[in-house]
Image: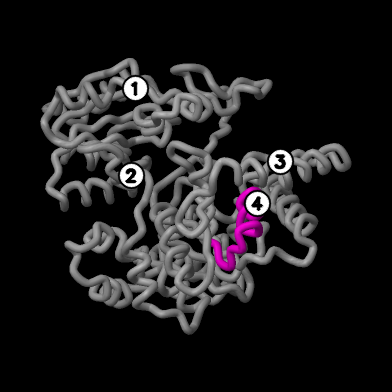
Amino acid sequence: MPPQFDPAYYNTVDQAFHADWTIQKLTRQELTRRAVAELWPDGHPTSLVQVAGTSGKGSTCRLLEAALGTAAPSGAYLNPHVFDYRERFSIGGEPPAPTAVTAAWEGTVLPYCVTASADRGIVHTFAEVGILLALTLFDRFGVAWAAMETGLGGRYAQLRGLDVAAGVLTNVGDDHPVSLGTEPWQRALDKAGIARHDVPLFTSESDPEMLAWIRGVAAGAGADLVEVGDGEVAAVRDGLGDPAAEALAANPVQHRNIALALATARHLVPDLDAAAALAAMAAVRFTGRLSEVAPGVFADIAHNPDKTAALAAEVRRREMAPVLVVGLSGERRAPEVLGPLLDVAAAAVVVTPPYRGRAAEEVAGEIAAAAPDLAVEVVADPRRAVEAARRLGPGPVLVTGSTYAVDAVLNDDPYLRHLNATMGWRFDTPVYEPGKGPGRPVSPSS
């Protein structure tokens, strides 16, 4: 019989076993904390909510922004972006103008970082400057509430260095085993690691075993865990009204995210108008979440088994039979990531994402082995992929599998497309090699 789950001790053992790595990660959090304290010595004026999870965290951030925006000016910090770096910063539901991002960088963040490097030898990372840019923009635009999306994991993310009014954990699924651990309880330790003493942690996790681990982590941290269950989800579904009226209301995958966002917002703003908050959330549109970017062409940045399973369920619900345009990045393999989508696809076109991309021929071979009756074509130029997909079938085209693939196929700005694809080219150790991926694991989604 296994011993009682002791998350604090198991985390201690894990940290001691990997002390060099652990201390470096926690040092980055401390440097982020100090940067915020130096830039805003009286405290940052925006109340923040940290959102973590395997899937739905970006959507939940946007939903929180919409709900809280019915009470006060709101914003969100999101990652990764799909086409434009500005997508990471949302002010009242919209990305700031390029001039605003440049002003925040040149007027506040870059001077601070250069001074920190010159005076103390501290070189802030891509993730840290993104956080500082978001906070600078929130300050300049008078944002009262902002949801902050955690990139990978939770316990060791730089966002853990910020003071927050609440934590939100959407769920804990099967993702990033190399970084988060191969066992489900290890991923729970990491993602639920955003829990903080005397700060409420909201979750909509529905798996009983995973919930038990999350409860243990929250209790050990001294966080009040608020579980958003099926009853709250059903109430949201009823409150959204006619599902034909709004695409979001018609998507059952989002009902749990809406319930989670609403519960969090009502805690933070006790007199929140719930009906107005629901209406605002129902009006949210998500870039890269089965969004129609051109007539008959859809994009979704699903890139792990949980997300592609949810995407496949929504494709099936809409009675779509799409021709897939797919590319995979990193170490992801087609059967694990794309399996559910292959069951609903009419055909597939495979490309090589320019950043961290797996060779299209390899991915196409894996697809052919997993779905031998599916027509599969390899296209060398991602910009020709949609055209090729339209030749393969009359149905809609769905571009997915990797954010980098979506960008390479659909981004009409050649300058941003090149910058996105070659992120890291200035590093001494090359991060980018066309068709080969990075020389070391640095990613613009971190």
- Residue tagged by mark 4? 15
| Residue 305 disc label | 2
Q: Identify the image quadrant of residue 322.
A: top left
Q: Is disc 3 placed on a helix, strand or loop?
A: helix
Provide the residue designation for mark 3. 106
> Which quadrant of the view contains residue 407?
top left
The alpha-carbon separation of the residues under discs 3 and 2 comes to 40 Å
Q: Is mark 2 on a helix, strand or loop?
A: helix
In the rendered image, the quadrant that contains the C terminus is top right
**Residue 136 spot, x, y in % from top left:** 66, 53
Does residue 341 appear left or right of residue 74 in this picture?
left
Return the residue nearer the eye: 419 or 180.
419
Between disc 3 and disc 2, whose residue precedes?
Answer: 3
Q: Which of marks 4 and 2 is nearer the N terminus?
A: 4
Residue depth check, mark 1 versus mark 4: number of the one nearer the observer: 1
Q: How far apart are marks 2 and 1 (CA)?
A: 23 Å
Q: Is residue 14 visible?
A: no
Type of the residue with mark 2:
Pro
* Residue nearer the viewer, 243 or 337: 243
For badge 3, the amino acid type reads: Glu
Disc 4 secondary structure class: helix
Q: Name the residue under label 1.
A: 382
